[in-house]
Amino acid sequence: MKQMSFVEFVAAMAASMSIYAMAIDAMLPALPAIGQYFSVADANHLQWIVTFFVAGGGTGQLFYGPLADRVGRRPVLLLGLALYVVLALLASFASSLPMLLALRFSQGLVAAVASVVPRAIIRDRHAGAKMAKVMSITLIVFLIVPVIAPTLGQGLLLIVPWQGIFAFMALYGSAVALWIYLRLPETQDPKHRRAISILNLGQAATRVVTEPSSIFYTFGVLCMQGSLMAYIATMPQIFTTAFHRPALMPTIFALCAGTMAVAAFFNSRIVERVGMRRVSHGTLTVFILLTGTHAAVCMAGQETLVTYAVLQALTMGCFGMTSANFNAIAMHKMGAVAGSAASVQGFLVMVGGALVGSLIGQMWNGYVTFLPVGALICGLAAMASVLIAEKGRLFGKDHLHADEPPHIID
């Protein structure tokens, strides 16, 4: 099998990782149609179509890292993609909302492979600055998916019923799986195979929850993830009920996702010079100010589509920069157990974020106020967690030691 070029390799990894985002964002325009099809009385229950998938994805984070270390990257990724395709097709035949939710959880469980294993493959092929470059490019591509996925989903609804979106997921997953099968050889050195050990995972979990910078910054990411999940899950309701402009949802969603992509690129250019703590503490502070301002605008009855779009886009930009650096800080002292620690932290963030997002989303009562208020509470909780981790000091320097490499990506 001929070696992939650098460009093709990056494109293949980005395509694999985009499967997870596509499965969330392409569904958003279809939620009202699914509600009508299943005669769902409470529209808030439709949010679970998103949160169940994310909860499944968080649970899957625990398994694929250790499994890929034991049997290799290629078979685990291909098996996960194959199961994803099957579950997407089964979801298109769901006969009730509970059945669809069960399938969405299962779909998220296997889709997690596309989030975890590509990072391990990138690590196998590249190291140091080259690895960081590949990760940055794939992250930017990953963030572009939310720009186009809702528009794609809305376009599909013009020609097919909501079940067609799941059929498209299956088609896209099949195309990526075929690409990987034909072009990507196994990247793990057989000498690096490691036995699956529950004990090792338990030791990593203990390290994660007892190291202050790990657990408190992980909790900070969890809070931020909760605000993001609430925003994503309630977009259809907000644009249908509050603004009466459902056709504009993909455009505004693309604006906010584009802001996150730009923020991620900007972060990659300044973080080494300014420092992870200074950047993330600053952007978290701005996040709190923006959500507080947005909540005040809503409570004063001055919310419009323009204020929503501008303030939400700026908020999402701060989310991107804050979460990226919080993740890096949380992993900094996990060098000895990096792979398993990443799985544990990913599980906590995704499942916890889904629960927090669901709690915020269930506050929906026809007015937008719940969203910035929920995000403000999440921001304040994240700030409190950071203050505990940093012993009350903000904007400090990053302290890297010789035995703790500055970039740990597993």
Image (cartoon, rainbow, N blue to C red):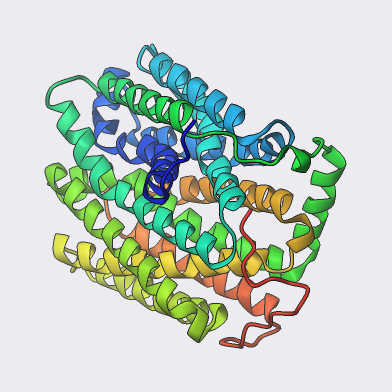
Give the x, y percent position of residue 199: 87, 42
Residue 341 located left or right of residue 89: right
Give the x, y percent position of residue 47: 39, 38
Q: How many marks?
A: 0
Give the x, y percent position of residue 164: 26, 20
Instruction: Answer whether residue 320 is visible to the viewer in this image.
Output: yes
Residue 292 located left or right of residue 358: left
Q: Is residue 286 above or below residue 125?
A: below
Q: Residue at x 66, y 34 (%)?
A: 72
Q: Nearer the viewer, residue 352 or 92?
A: 92
Instruction: Answer whether residue 47 is visible to the viewer in this image.
Output: no
Q: Is residue 38 above or below residue 22?
A: above
Q: Nearer the viewer, residue 374 or 87?
A: 87
Residue 231 located left or right of residue 203: left
Q: Is residue 2 above or below residue 357?
A: above
Q: Residue at x 29, y 25 (%)?
A: 168
Q: Residue at x 13, y 22 (%)?
A: 159
Q: Of all residues shown, which one is farthest toward the front? A: 2
Q: Nearer the viewer, residue 313 or 293?
A: 313
Q: Residue at x 38, y 78 (%)?
A: 289
Rendered image quadrant of residue 163: top left
Q: Of all residues shown, which one is farthest toward the right? A: 199
Give the x, y percent position of residue 206: 82, 55
